[in-house]
Image (cartoon, grey):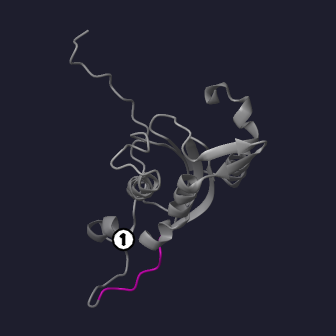
Amino acid sequence: MNAKAQPRRLPLRLAGYDYSQPGNYFVTICEHGHRRIFGYVSGTEMRLNSAGAAVRDAWFDLPTRFPSVVPIELVVMPNHLHGILALTQPIRSAKRGAASSAPTDENRNSSYPTVGKVMRAFKSISAIEVNRILGRAGESVWQRNYYEHIIRSPEEFQRIRKYILENPLHWHDDPENF
């Protein structure tokens, strides 16, 4: 094998899917080195430290930056997080002189953020604050990518929500956490 050859990363996103369209999205983001920097699990409850609280606050503050984003659920674990975000499309008024208020391809991207754009902003904002709290500068907080899943039914939404809420219950049973 060529020493310069890089392993090819498999795409994580659904090909051809418009990630700015309204819907619910399940995301998982892992800490860069799987270090436990956000707190600890005590019994069956997650106890956030100040870095974990900053991550939580950045998540629930996303609508300030993206008014069409609704953070629905979140659990910050010692070295990762799971959350559900809803993307909505607010009603827009017609532009002066426009024949229609329907979004065009030209203005759609600036009006409706994609899941990727929201996750990039979240990771950046939360990393800056986590590094400030931990007294370090420029260190990676999050892994390069994240896992996402488009939630397609109310039953799936409830199953994923339960998984998120019960995540601390299973922390000590997961061999990857030791």
> Image height check: is 145 above or below 98?
above
> Image height check: is 140 above or below 59?
above
Prevalent SS, magenta region: loop
Q: Residue at x 36, y 71 (%)?
A: 111
Chain part drawn in magenta: 88-95
Give the crowd class for mark 1: few <14, some 14-19, many >=20 residues within 10 Å: some
> Please, which residue is most extreme toward the right here?
43
Q: Observer-nearest residue: 169 or 113?
A: 169
> Please, which residue is most extreme toward the front here?
135
> Image height check: is 87 above or below 147?
below
Q: Observer-nearest residue: 175 or 178?
A: 178
Q: Residue at x 32, y 22 (%)?
A: 7
Q: Is residue 24 magenta?
A: no
> Image height check: is 97 above or below 76?
below
Q: Observer-nearest residue: 168 or 155?
A: 168
Q: Observer-nearest residue: 172 or 132?
A: 132
Q: Provide residue 41's location: percent of width, then percent of height.
A: 70, 43
Q: Provide residue 77's location: percent of width, then percent of height.
A: 62, 45
Quarter holding residue 71:
bottom right
Q: Amino acid at mark 1?
A: Ser
Lateral position of residue 95 relative to residue 133, left or right: left
> Please, which residue is most extreme toward the top here?
1
Per the image, the residue denoted by label 1 is 111
Q: Residue at x 49, y 70 (%)?
A: 63
Residue 29 visible (yes or no): yes
> Please, which residue is most extreme toward the bottom here?
96
Image quadrant occupied by the C terminus: top right
Q: Residue at x 73, y 33 (%)?
A: 172
Lateral position of residue 163 relative to residue 137, left or right: right
